[in-house]
Image (cartoon, rainbow, N blue to C red):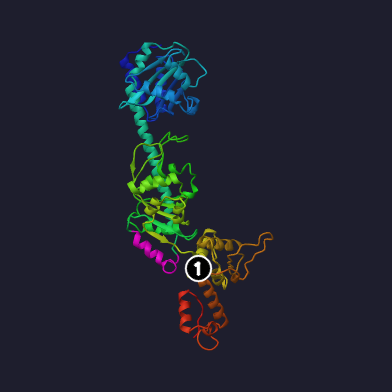
Amino acid sequence: MKKVSNTDFFEEMTLRICSSLDLERSLLRCYEYLDKIVPLNFLNLVIWDDNFKYPDVVASVEEGEIDRSPPENYFHFAVPDDLRLFLKNLWEKPGCVRMINSWDESEYSKAMRQLVKSEHDLSIISLPLQLDNLTIGVFSISAIGRNLYTERHVELISVLKDPFTIALSNDLRYRELVSLKEQVEDDNRFLREELNQITGDEIIGAKTGLLKVMQLTDQVAPMGCPVLLLGETGTGKELIANAVHFSSPRKSGPFIKVNCGAIPESLIDSELFGHEKGAFTGALSQKAGRFERAHGGTIFLDEIGELPPKAQVRLLRVLQQKEIERVGGVNMIPVDVRIISATNRNLEEMVDSGEFREDLWFRLNVFPIVIPPLRMRVRDISDLVSYMIRRKAAQMNINRIPEPAPDTIRKLSAYHWPGNVRELENVVERSLIRHKGGLLHISPFFSERGNGTTVADRDPFETIPTLDQGITNLIHRALDATNGKIYGPGGAAEILDMHPNTLRYKIDKLGIRKKIRI
């Protein structure tokens, strides 16, 4: 082997270590030089987490070629606690360079046999890399065989501590910047998609059936207090949450949506609050949760009634202290987030039954907004149908938008709509799919089970209407029978045994659109 002075060795190796931002290339150039100086088959540069539990191979060279094998090929995962503590105590000592010349029965040899996968007897020199008294990684050289390294070899490798520490530290910072850049790009992509979706939505009925809701929305939007949206499924709670956020001073910040009922209970803490690397099996990197991503903006917690008890406790802490703690973390992270929650469940009953924390309910129920079901917004059905036909036709590439068949709105208004606006949207879409030209026939009824025949012509009055629906239906019948005549003998008021002015008031209140004759 070639003889070299410490100074020449340090200068040459430092040049090679700093020759590229890619540590794999740098390590390959180091191998080409080291192979002339010391016995050598393998070079490894490894990052260890703070707890010495998960080694991450940054760069590896085997027999003069870059080796990109997964870490499992080098190490036994995860590192057992006794070995982890042994290595932590050993490698954190200042100036610790270890040499193994044979697989003897020393504690370090036993530890390395337990850690490193190898079919061969190896001679190893390991150099812990310490920054601010913390071991961030280990550089090691190894050769196949026993008793191959001398104290002179250890002396040479020892001078490489600072260059490799700086290189590894810079690589860690670079990785962090890349990760943050990817996260920002992901957040921007996510927000652009959300914004495109939001700007494409209209709030139909904002001046009629949802007038009171929109008044409350305008009232609370400038405030920073929590908002609780209550209503049956499919009433448009998410649309109102959008309106609150984008009418608030936080509109330029992120708007993060979370469906609490769609996340497995075992993952909900990680999804909401994030996790640290190594917090649990599979947590190979640090991850920011939804609350961190919503910092400076709004988080919308849909189906809040599905939140498990443990997550309820952590959410209460966020509301009280404005800070979160990642899973596996020890530091509190301050967050500035407005919380909008929504549910179709009765939270008061859940509190009484012990399913939902009373203190959390008090915190969320600062400003409740009840969104009426579609059966209470009969006047909006006509506008909703027109809007949905245009929107769905565009999505389905239907160039010629069909007109609804006569009496469509009357039939749809007579239905009780258990699925609300979402069900109406599905009905319109199904009708467009089946449309074969001419007028568009829209029916809220599905096909008969078994024979596939439709029941679109079924009398809508077979369903049980609400009081307003029943009155609406009766007025429609009376106006149809009198050809729109209200006053005088044979008029609709006479048939219904009502004062004509009362009937006219009902027609206006219920949004009945008919040709009226005096």
- Residue in the picture at 48% in, 13% down: 145
Rendered image quadrant of residue 286: top left
**Residue found at x 37% / y 32%:** 172
Compared with 394, 268 (above or below) is: above
Is residue 219 part of the magenta span, yes or no?
Answer: yes
Residue 230: where, in percent of width, then height?
Answer: 44, 59
Residue 388 makes an appearance in the image: yes
Which residue is nearer to you in this view: 302 or 362?
A: 362
How many neighbours does mark 1 have within 10 angstroms: few (below 14), some (14-19), or many (20 or more)? many
Residue 49 % position (x, y): 39, 30
Q: Which residue is identified by label 1?
A: 381
Q: Residue furthest right?
A: 451
- What is the secondary structure assignment of the residue under circle 1? helix
Q: For the magenta stretch, what is the residue range?
A: 204-221
Quarter occupied by the N terminus: top left
**In the figure, 29 relative to 153: above or below?**
below
Q: For the residue marked with disc 1, what is the amino acid?
A: Ile
Q: Is residue 222 left or right of residue 502?
A: left
Comparing 78 with 303, the one in front is: 303
Q: Position of residue 463 (x, y in %)?
A: 59, 68
Residue 399 placement, left or right of 450 = left
